[in-house]
Amino acid sequence: MLNLARFHGGLHLPNNKDLSNQAPLRQASIPKKLVYPLMQRPGVSVDPKVQVGDRVLRGQVIAYSDHPLATPVHAASSGIIEAIEERLIPHPSGMADVCIVIATDGKDESLVTQGVADFSSQDPAAIRSAIKNAGIVGLGGAAFPTAIKLNPGPQRKLDTLLLNGAECEPYITCDDCLMQNQPESVLVGAQILLHSLHIERCIVAIEDHMTRAYARLTQAVAALNDPRIIVVQVPAIYPTGGEKQLIKVVTGKETPSGGIPADIGVLCVNVGTASAVYDAVCNGKPLTERVITITGRGVKEPQNRYVRIGTPISELIEQCGGYTEHVERLIMGGPMMGFALPDDEIAVVKATNCILAGTAADINTGKQAMPCIRCGDCAKACPVDLLPQQLYWHSRAGNLDKCKEFSLFDCIECGCCEVVCPSHIPLVQYYRSAKSKVIAKAKEAEKASVAKRRHDMHLERKAKEQAEKAERARLKKEALAKVKQANAEKEGVTQ
Amino acid sequence: MKFSTALSPHVQPVNSVTRVMFEVIIALVPGVIALFWFFGWGVLINVVLAVITALMAESLILLVRGRPVWVSLKDLSAVVTAVLLAISLPAIAPWWVTVTGILFAIVIAKHLYGGLGYNPFNPAMVGYVFLLVSFPLPMTSWPAMTGLGTMTLNFQDIAQLILFERIPENADYDALTMATPLDALKTQLSLQKSVLEAQSGAVFGYLAGKGWEWVSLAYLLGGLWLMVRKIINWHIPAGLILGISVISGICYLIDAQIYAPPMFHLFAGATMLGAFFIATDPVTAATTVKGRLIYGMMIGVLVYIIRVWGGYPDAVAFSVLLANLAAPALDYFTKPRVFGHRA
């Protein structure tokens, strides 16, 4: 048995998971349209590899780029490329960007692909490239390319693979549901990762209320008879599913500030990602669908479904019986860290774990902010042990150096401080804004230093030119003087 | 379908300033009842007078400052200040004492510094100290405790005393008042009596002063309730109680003749009120865990020092204000280690 540690703060939130985890996991039907944004992360966009009018098959690459952080995009069903145009994309700012739109034909024809029967004969590099080609990114929400994560460099010695099944956000049950329905694919995915990383220990961490998932996983581990894998239940305290928090709970170790888990020998992967790795390596299937929780009191039949990536949310909601009359807000992700969407025509992406339709009764519809009374409840709730209240004063005053001194960039924006704040201050907004100001200032400073270097070099060049010019003038003068002297001497001789 | 958006977190807040203040008021009820029991109607008259004055002063100053009145009024912070100051005043203090104290607390100590959340000093204690140094006589004239005095006053007598300063017929002011246990101890010690001799006086009870010890126990009860309700943390009260216990314990061990036992200092005067209701005012206290412990201890030690070697019988107000000064520095030097940072 593992000795569990705990992290500072955190919250016991009403989890509302029973809303969605009672219904069976079903396949969502093929949507009429599939929409794929070309922007994958800030600054990383892929190029379309198809043209309007092309017919594509399921599993076909429709966009890709050479950028190291880019992953290929695959069509999730067969159909015709209808448009490559600007549409709203799922982004906290509600921005629009170029998307590939497929009009599906309902035939769902796939490219013929084949996996490898025995992954243990495969070279780690080959596994990584299979993972990359399958377009796999972290399905927990961050969507970082998994293949890159699997190659942390020779200076970092890994010893533990941590499968994150601790879905700590309220409402979300997609990982729970996946582990209940397909524990084998999650565990075989873990075996593939262990093999490719040359490590001998895997911990699957789930929250203590997931009793059915725990039973199914432990059964599957017993069936696999793999002593390297253990399943642990961790206390359900939000944000225990945060990567660094979960590592602390399970291993007792803290990821250094500014570092990555691999620095302390841990690689943390979401359970859904492990399952996708299994599909990619053993079945040769690229990542074209995932389990998504459609939930909240704003939708009639909350449930989990296998959803094709690219499916517009409106079609998903329709398949879940439509909205209830009290729907107020549409959120992608959980209620703590998810972002509100302006429109349900937006399509789900690989990182989408939950679509939450909230009602005014259960979401914050904007309370009047009162002055901070310095009660310190925020500091008590902060899982990173920051002083949110001090950070608030400094970010509000625009005192960015002080913000850095109070470790602004260690804030994970989990929202605990804001939920407990009796004054209803939008704390996380202040931190986000302060962070972007610090980053903008650093960029500005970088630009200024480049400009200064350029200016200095310009001055140097000018000075050099002037010196050369003066030298030339001097030489010319000397030469002239010599000529004059010679002439004078000549004249003297002739006189 | 279109939706309006907002930034995360989308979860509803679990607390509010109004709730915090309301719980504090509820937790003060046992203390007020105990005071009423021992000192009569004056306690309630003072509280009502103070609350009405505070709400009016708060409304007016908010209007002058161009701030929304109702939003701030309903946070109940002015009511808390009013009740805290009212129960610190002698239960027969003339009405103008209460009114000027509240005006000073709300207008000067709170709003001239920016209102709720911005005041560096505890408004109720600023009001109290202002009254104590300006009007020492009415501020130190506590009525004789029920059963200890030579006469019993009814509601009408006390109302007349407070509102019109009219002393009931066939009574003189001195007969109405009585020294508090802390006063009595100080006087007796200055007369070269020992603590034990002093404590044989009529005003002393089991733990500290007769009656006063029950008031203190009632405050303790309310304070524990606030902890259960998670309105206050244990750090400041524990620090304060520890501070006063340790220093009074040491002195008591050195010479029990001239230093009262720790139990006396814990249950005399405003120790319990200070520990759970005054020092825990979040706005003016330290905010870090370590900072709060030190802050509490500082107040505890200062209360003892001023009580024993200073010019005043009790010292919670002075000690809290002095510690208020130190709060920002305490916060600065007691920052917790951030996750993933080295110790």
Image: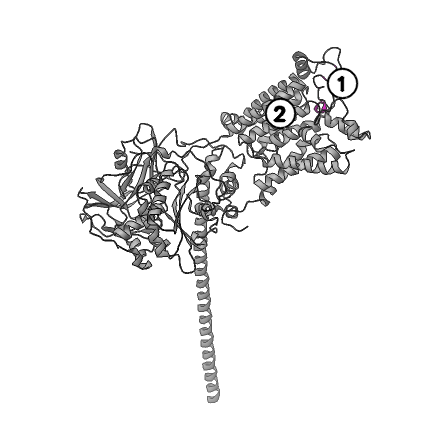
Q: Residue furthest top?
A: B169
Tell me which label, 2 or 1, sits earlier in the chain: 1
Secondary structure under tag 2 reads helix
Q: Position of residue A272 (x, y in %)?
A: 33, 45
Image-quadrant location for residue B277: top right
Q: Nearer the viewer, residue B23 or B246?
A: B246
Q: Nearer the viewer, mark 2 or mark 1?
A: 2
Q: Is residue B92 visible?
A: yes
Q: Main secondary structure of the magenta part?
A: loop
Within 10 Å of disc 2 (Cα), the crowding (few <14, some 14-19, many 20+) is: many
Rounded to the nearest angstrom, the CA distance separating label 2 from label 1 is 28 Å
Q: In the image, is residue B243 part of the stretch drawn in magenta?
A: no
- The answer to whether A147 is drawn above or below residue B174 in the figure is below
Circle 2 sits on which residue? B218
Image-quadrant location for residue B12: top left
Circle 1 sits on which residue? B174
Q: Position of residue A396 (x, y in %)?
A: 49, 40
The amino acid at mark 1 is Asp
Secondary structure under tag 1 reads helix
Within 10 Å of disc 1 (Cα), the crowding (few <14, some 14-19, many 20+) is: few
The amino acid at mark 2 is Ala
Q: Are marks 2 and 1 on the same chain?
A: yes
Residue A210 is left or right of residue B307, and the answer is left
Residue A318 is left or right of residue B130, and the answer is left
Magenta residues span B138-150
